[in-house]
Amino acid sequence: MSTEREHFSSRLGFILAAAGSAVGIGNLVGFPVNAAKNGGGAFLLMYALFVFLICLPVMIAEMAVGRKTEKEPVGAYKALSGGSKAWGAAGFLGVLTPFMIAVFYMVLTVWIFGYIALTLAGDLDYLASSNGFGEFINSPYLFVAMIAVAAIINFILVAGVKEGIERASKILMPTLFIMLFAMVIFVLTLDNAIAGVKFFIIPDITKLTPAVINGALSQAFFSLSLGMGILITYGSYIDSKTDIVGSAKLVALTDTAVAFTAGLMILPAVFSFNPNVNPAELSDSSVSLIFTFLPKIFLALQTSIGYIGASAVALFFFTLVFFAAITSLVSILEVPVSYLVTEKKHSRKKALSILMMTAGVLTVFATLSFGMVSFFTEFTFYAGGVRSFFDIIYDVFYDTILPLNGFLLCMFVSYRWKKHNLSDELAIGNKNYKGSWVEKYINFSLGTFIPVIVFGIFINTVAQKFFAYSIFGF
């Protein structure tokens, strides 16, 4: 079944949807602590430089490829390469990656939904207890929560681009921004909060090691949803009137602003909870911070605002993170949905049914890999340790394959599709693009140092993740 391709109804709708894909759990929680642990303002500066000098050209190229072809990664690569099977395979990797990422992201979203339910039930003290999280992730009620989250995602995606993705983004993203700012204002009123602000924004140049610089680049690349096929797919839904370069800048600015603002929420809360905290001892894991550390902070608020007040703040925070997770999950799943609709000629409803069944089964397996079933908990062994089914998905598809997909995109745009064709596409909707310094920089960077840097990240990640060895010595 073939249907006419939908488009976003406005530039604002596209920007909010693209920003929704970029603003996720990592931005709200993981980024602030990584910044605080790695030089504060110095890390922020490196992150911002990498976003606009390295990540932005890749983002622009993805959007251009999508709009030119009006297809997702597989169809786009095939269309612009003259039907090349090799590039078609590269495109399929760009569809498989978000499909698998959706599995582990679904697990986290289900956990957040469960935390919302337990907080509403008055169980914040249980969530803050030493055994709370370990018992929670092995609860059979998670599968009920999984059905609820899947229903929400299906409701948004089945409605299509305009009535589903765009409408949800126009509601969820402004709500998320308002909630985030409200949370920041509240946190900054807490005792010792300013110490957290200072630690977050004051540069410490001595901490800018090669490892920190590499971490800032990786954080920037991952936080903007590069290499997931999302921006190719979303780019296929924008019209020729849209200025891709200008829109991409706004998405990057929004993502960076949210990450920075989240730092003004998380770090002051941490310092208020423990004025003597050593940020170097905080976990890099967003999972650990959200589900084990932050509930303790919220519970500690009961001494000043009571248990109900503390629970209300916790509920507000978990709802904020849930909105961010939903917008990201919708964009991640839209890539394989678009593939099934465009390449396999399925209706949107049938495509979603196929995905809900296949991704649903894998999500169940991933949920079982935290102790419920030993087969999935001890799925394999590498880099000196036992790895679960969930670990495999995260290590292979999120940490490793994303930079490889970014490298392939750079090579495709620069040497297969050709730079002049990219310039022609980007000039549509931007009459001043041709001959500008932006055009020169994008064409030069995508064909030279960006693919080298991104491929270096890929190789080093493989060495570190699977062989416990750093090629670059950090």
Image (cartoon, rainbow, N blue to C red):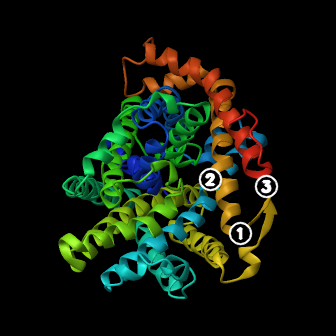
Going by the numbered disc 2, the residue's amino acid type is Tyr
22 vs 373, left or right, is left
Picture quadrant of residue 412: top right
Instruction: Name, please, the residue furthest toward the front.
Output: 276
Residue at point 50%, 36% (across, down): 59
Q: Quadrant of the C terminus?
A: top right
How far across and down, in percent of the image, does residue 258 sit? 34, 46
Q: How much space separates mark 2 and mark 1, taking CA atoms?
A: 15 Å
Q: How much space separates mark 3 and mark 2, taking CA atoms?
A: 17 Å
- Which mark, residue 10? none
Q: Which residue is mark 2?
A: 398
Q: Nearer the viewer, residue 389 or 102?
A: 389
Picture quadrant of residue 343: bottom right
Kind of element beneath mark 3: loop
Crowd band around label 3 with a 10 angstrom C-alpha radius: few (<14), some (14–19), many (20+): few
Q: How much space separates mark 1 and mark 3, taking CA atoms?
A: 13 Å
Q: Which residue is mark 1?
A: 388
Going by the numbered disc 3, the residue's amino acid type is Ala
How far across and down, in percent of the image, does residue 204 sit? 43, 31
Residue at point 46%, 26% (across, down): 426
Kind of element beneath mark 2: helix
Assess whether mark 2 and mark 3 are in contact (beta carbons under 8 angstroms): no
